[in-house]
Image (spheres, rainbow, N blue to C red):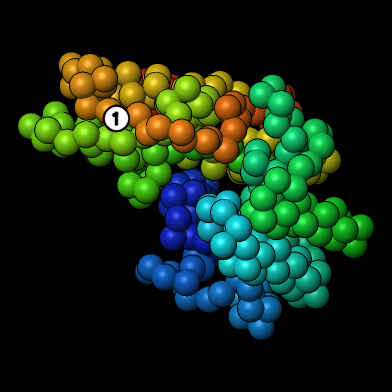
Amino acid sequence: MVAVIFGANGQDGFYLNRLLIQNGVKVVGVSRNGDWLHADVSNYTEVSDIIRLHKPDYIFHLAANSATRHEVMFENHATISTGTLNILEAVKVYSPATRVFLSGSGLQFINKGLPIKETDEFAATSAYAVSRIQSVYAARYYRSYGINAYFGYFFNHESPLRPERHMSKKIACAVQRIGNGSSEKIEIGDISVKKEWAFAGDIVNGIFTLVQQDEIFEATIGSGQAYSIEEWLEACFGLIGQNWKDSVIIKDNFKAEYNVLVSDPSTLNSLGWQPEVSFSSLAKMMVAE
């Protein structure tokens, strides 16, 4: 069996690559950088050449800029929306038996602070959400041609591979340094914001569970448990026996993108998937790295 991962150089690509190899699947990793096959998912010729050559059993489209600000609208559109269309059309033409997984986001739904399920209504609240929503409708359209196009809606998930620009890693790295004697201060916005802190390795297990299905094609993939940034601070600083309040500066007049973002993963749970790494275990993993 063969799988192609677009966006293999990212956090999810790393863990998915490892999982697929463990399951006896040969992986063709594709990225614009790193030690992978270099190609641009927004270029149809490059995408179709890869799919025509390998005729993979699976394709996973994980490539994206995770930023939601308007200034990266065209990059998001090219990678997410155009990339999705390129993959689906190339599969239709050259490899119609391929199972295609496309990544979505909890940020593309109306968020009322309640657990979000894949059947909930979308909301075009950012250019990023627009690209994700367009990709969903593209997947649904190509299913009418018999393409097995799966859509998994991601919520916040972490690992030691996160770059330090992400809040989870920013705090974990600072805690490491403070534990080793640094006197630095961490500047953070609204620490009451609640989101999921799932482990990326668990999330890719959810992806693999979804693409084995013959009748279910969309599911939220998340822990279903929300924790505040303050709770993350407490968990991380607790590992070095210090009070986070001594090392954190709260930004004034900071406006968070949301107050709570949490999934309802009941569909995937019904298929036998459950996350294994707990909130506290994730903190230990990231502070220890």
Could you say where residue 107 lies in the image, as x and y percent from the top left? 65, 41
Rendered-image quadrant of the C terminus: top left
Label 1 Cα neighbours within 10 Å, binned few <14 / some 14-19 / many ≥20: few
Asked if residue 205 lies left or right of residue 110, the reply is: left
- Report the residue at 29% width, 24% height from top: 236
Residue extending furthest toward the left: 181
Could you say where residue 196 lies in the image, as x and y percent from the top left? 52, 29
Q: In which image quadrant can residue 123 be found? A: top right
Towards the viewer: 217 or 177: 177
- Report the residue at 57% width, 54% height from top: 69
**Residue type at the position of mark 1:** Ile
Q: How many marks?
A: 1
Q: In which image quadrant can residue 134 be found? A: bottom right
* Circle 1: element type: strand
Residue extending furthest toward the right: 144
Towards the viewer: 56 or 225: 225
